[in-house]
Amino acid sequence: MDTIHAIPALRERIAGWRARDESIALVPTMGNLHAGHLSLVEAAQSRAGRVVVSIFVNPMQFNDKDDFAAYPRTLEEDRRLLQDHNVDLLFLPEQAALYPKGLGATTRVEVPGLSGVLCGAFRPGHFVGVTTIVCMLLNIAQPEMALFGEKDFQQLLLIKRMVRDLHLPVRIIGMPTMREEDGLAMSSRNRYLTPEERSRAPLLYQALRRARDIIRNSHGGCDFRALEDDSMNLLREDGLRPEYFSVRRASDLALAGPDDRDLVILAAAWLGKARLIDNLRA
């Protein structure tokens, strides 16, 4: 596996692959890799001739400087995992290369509406940072496809909308959430959990499953707002600090109404220092 830091060098390597008619897949990450990330790598390898994994802890998507500073960085372990998975190229850009004029003077990419709800309401500016960096990486690598996990459902929907609206020639592929044996969605932030908190963390997934079952068994007669309130109270009783628990239309994240059938239930809750997010299709 080769490691490239400079944008011109990455473009030169990709141009060589493309000249040999090799397809390219990109897996953007912030490092601290786990089995969920590696499942994206494996899916990319099954779809493309060459796979590029990027690692960049993007400061623009952190609304809390302490959170950015504390974000786990495990580069040597990440390198080993990617090497073991036969990744073709690791792209490790420097912040100065991506933001040469600084964060405040950099052009930003925003998806109106979707950026300000759910996680966007609790993390102001977060999704502008996400869509900006993903747009940069897609422009730099120019892959045929890029893969993202469905655990970050709102992020995936935002990126798909951005690609469509900006007519970017890339296919965005969402892959199923990878879970631990007890149902907890895999996340780099799970490392923040103490052993006692880790034992309670699956309660978020259990609340989502409970809500999904209630919706499916209601045969179209579910009071979504009452279910949301009840689920929030249940999480509080279990010792979590929920930010939201919401039933939405899967296509655009609008609040679900009685006639909607393509639904997704999304939740975010704090447990100690860890902010957990998860979702289930209903």
Image: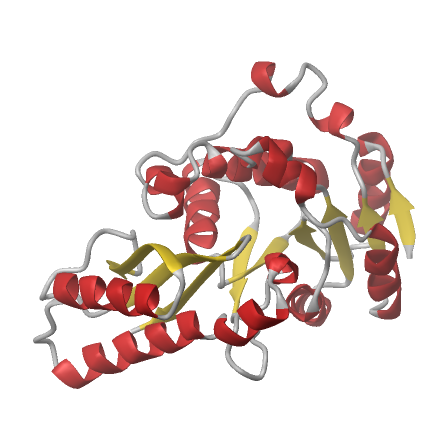
Display coloring: secondary structure
Residue 88 in view here:
no
Eyeballing the image, is 55 above or below 11? Answer: below
Tag count: 0
Image quadrant where one finds the C terminus: bottom left
- Horizontally, residue 21 falls left or right of residue 137, namely right
Residue 236 in view here:
yes
Report x, y in % for residue 64.
54, 34
Report x, y in % for residue 217.
18, 85
Report x, y in % for residue 245.
30, 60
Eyeballing the image, is 72 above or below 98? Answer: below
What residue lies at 78% left-to-right and 55% top-to-bottom?
21
Image quadrant where one finds the N terminus: bottom right
Figure quadrant of residue 267: bottom left
Q: Nearer the viewer, residue 155 or 191?
A: 191
Figure quadrant of residue 67: top right
Report x, y in % for residue 259.
10, 66
What residue lies at 41% left-to-right and 69% top-to-bottom?
204
Q: Nearer the viewer, residue 201 or 84?
A: 201
Eyeballing the image, is 71 above or below 279? Answer: above
